[in-house]
Amino acid sequence: MVKKIWLENYPEGMPAEIDPDRYKSIPDLFEKIAVKFAGRPACHNLGRTISFAQLEQLSRDFAAFLQGMPGMARGDRVAVMSPNLLQYPVALFGILRAGFVVVNVNPLYTPRELEHQLKDSGAKAIVIIENFAGILQQVLGNTSVEHVITTQVGDLLPLPKRWLVNFVIKHVKKMVPAWRIDGAIDFRAALADGAEKPLQPVELMREDVAFLQYTGGTTGVSKGAMLTHRNILANVEQTGIWVSATFREGAEIAIAPLPMYHIFCLTSTLSFMKWGSLIVLITNPRDLPALVKELGQWKFSVMTGVNTLFNGLLNTPGFDRLDFSALKVVVGGGAAVQEAVANRWQQATGRCITEAYGLTEASPGVCANPLETPWTGNIGFPFPSTDVSIRDGNFNELPVWTGAGDIEQYTGELCVRGPQVMKAYWNNPGETAKVMQDGWLKTGDVGHLDARGCVTITDRKKDMILVSGFNVYPNEIEGVVATHPGVLECGAVGVPDDKSGEAVKVVIVRKDEGLTKEAVIEHCKTHLTGYKRPRHVEFREVLPKSPIGKVLRRELRDEEKE
């Protein structure tokens, strides 16, 4: 029995438990929110704000359209491949209200990556921004996708701005490569069609899968974490109660610069919506001057981000002149927040970054520091209704570290148990068995628990590389690099990077002595999303290996540290 020593150090008024069964499903929560805050603004993007009532109506129409598509049955998967646009929450809530499962897809995927996710999920339909329809066109015939709904960036903007935005993106900036998918349906046409149809009520159960949220694996092949309605709702309650001590209903403005296809943004957005907050969706957070300009339009009170984003904003002209008087909560996750960045942020804004920890398989929130805690280097306390345990290689529980003795004796794998932990990996019992034991999720992260119940992550059991909060797995990188005819063998590791926390480095033994760094990077562009591509390439005569011939990545990492 795990002793919850952290409860004694919880923030005042924080409950030990939450009710994960308060709502029947995500649509049940959303529909109650939409009634309660009907006239309040729900989402803003590219100059347009829609109310909760409008979001409810648009998602209802989209749900009715989806239900009317031939061959679709309750529980079928529908992929969404788009950056943050108003279309995203409309599609997301529409899919769930229709009784289907959302498959979030990174819009920057290469054809290889997209094909794997669509085939593995068995998605029958996809909602895709037409900027990336050419990628889909290349792989569509190899998937089970039967219905394609395409949208343009400006589709939910008022006239004449809609026409102008879509014209500029397509014909001036030329951001839409040529594509042709027979039978593709326009998003606006889908909404119009659904508006004429009734929405058939669907009785969703809490244990029904809501999302297939894909995450990398030690095999280099991404796996779909089956996140149920209960998983997500539990984490909405857990994270929401942790950060909302000073929130006022219908009064908060939350900036959402992280993509909604990322589980961190997805769950935090639902948490803020529960308060009737206005969510400002940022379509391109990489354009930092534009983001600073957008921030200047709002007296925002809540913001989520990753270390890379915070660091980038601090180095963007004009950020230090913004109005931070309404700012209440800033949550940092996805990767460790660096001390220098945290300190500069506090000096610039007057607010601390609340560092939190989670992973896709936990919907994602597991731990967080109390609000307004200056940088500590740890990940804080477990959320309500969450158990954590540090285990050794034989799954034996290790004692807490009291500050004395060799800390290595108290260091092991962080394991998590709670209502937010995934059901399993989709159609992958082998990988599920590797990470689930006796109701516990093995996170793959290594750390210790101190006498206050505070968790510190010290290392990663897996060889995962964290680039701007996104997981990159060496096996996948090595697999792609090794397909180049000039490569004999290679190893991939993460190296420190001021901008992205870590960057990918590949160490290569050449087959062709004429092989260049530029050729390797160009090869990777065809097969890997931007953040996965190597930033550093080194050529060697030999690689460090184990007696059985396995490349020793740890030695490569240790050499980098030295």
Image: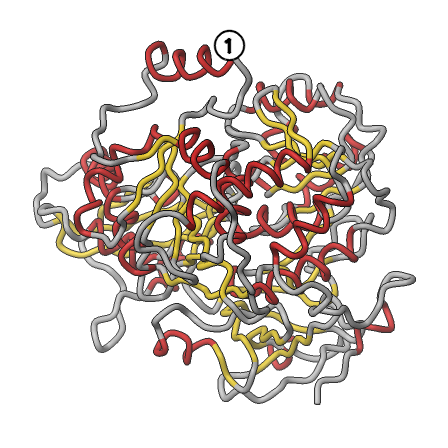
Q: Amino acid at mark 1?
A: Pro
Q: Position of residue 184 (x, y in %)?
A: 28, 35
Q: Picture quarter containing residue 454?
A: bottom right
> According to the image, what is the colour scheme of the structure?
secondary structure
* Residue located 56% across and 80% down the image: 440
| Quarter of the image with the N terminus in it | bottom right
Q: Position of residue 498 (x, y in %)?
A: 53, 38
Q: Considering the numbered disc 1 on the image, is that residue within a helix, a strand or a loop?
A: loop
| Quarter of the image with the C terminus in it | bottom left
* Residue located 46% across and 24% down the image: 155
Tell me: residue 163, above or below residue 420: above
Side of 246 relative to 156 (left or right) = right
Side of 225 relative to 390 (left or right) = left
Pick the residue in front: 9 or 150. 150
Q: Position of residue 212 (x, y in %)?
A: 44, 59
* Residue located 53% across and 67% down the image: 445
Side of 508 relative to 99 (left or right) = left
Tell me: residue 247, above or below residue 282: below
Tell me: residue 552, above or below residue 521: below
- Which residue is the extreme one toward the right? 12
Q: Position of residue 203 (x, y in %)?
A: 56, 64
Q: Which residue is mark 1?
A: 160
